[in-house]
Amino acid sequence: MRKHAWLHAALAGTAAAFAAVAQAHEPADPKYGGQVVVAAHLDFEIVQRDNDLVFYIEDHSELVPTEGAQGKVAIAADGEGAAVELKPLAPNMLVASGVSLKPGDQVAVSLLLQRPADITFHFSLGADGQTMRRVAMPGMLPAEFPRFR
């Protein structure tokens, strides 16, 4: 029993580490009336405001500055695609103007914040028009979509 005690301790430590990582990726509760998607350890709350798609960005409840950020949103719907530039607004907002999502729309977001790496994530709007979920959509990004690095 003793000779395997180190193995049990190592497995317990590994399980605790995975549990901590899993908790770190849990989305925060929405604060602005939208839904939260986690990407690159950041919370992106996505809110539809009239004809604008607004992204509020936080890191463990701390606002992530968007000044100087660059990015685009690509939307695939009904076999058609469009890309819209994201404009930074203080303190932690990015806005895609003229974007109104419909149920079933597939969305790709590519950003360059004041961080060491690009951030790219994909989500879809559920049939209820409310629920957003992360999805894997390889090859969806149009050729003109920015690749920052």
Image (cartoon, rainbow, N blue to C red):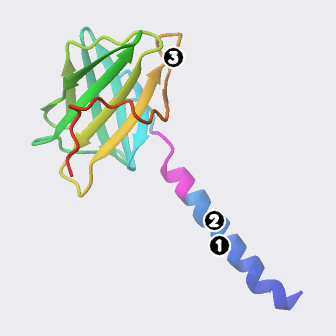
- The residue wearing badge 2 is 16
Which residue lies at the image location 38% right of the left edge and 38% below the top edge? 121
Quadrant housing residue 137:
top left
Q: Is residue 120 above or below residue 22?
A: above
* Number of other residues with Cα within 10 Å of mark 2, as a class: few under 14, some 14 to 19, many 20 or more: few
Indicate which label's residue lies in the foreground, 2 or 3: 3
Q: Is residue 87 positioned above or below 121 on the image?
A: above
Residue 77: image location, x then y, percent: 39, 13
Amino acid type, callout 1: Gly
Q: Earlier in the sequence, mark 1 or mark 3?
A: 1
Residue extending furthest front?
143
Circle 2: residue type = Ala
Magenta extent: 21-27
Query: Residue 50 sits in which quadrant?
Result: top left
Q: Nearer the viewer, residue 15 or 78?
A: 78
Confirm whether the magenta stretch covers residue 103.
no
Label 3 residue SS: loop
For this orientation, the residue located farthest to the bottom is 3
Name the residue carrying label 1.
13
Q: Which residue is located at x 21 percent, y 52 percent?
A: 149
Real-space CA distance between mark 1 and mark 2, rounded to the nearest whole angstrom: 5 Å
Q: Which residue is mark 3?
A: 126
Q: How many marks?
A: 3
Asked if marks 1 and 2 touch (Cβ < 8 Å), the reply is yes
Provide residue 33's location: percent of width, then percent of height.
37, 21
- Quadrant position of residue 47: top left
Above or below residue 15? Residue 129 is above
* Percent x, y of residue 1: 89, 86
Mark nearest the camera among 1 and 3 is 3
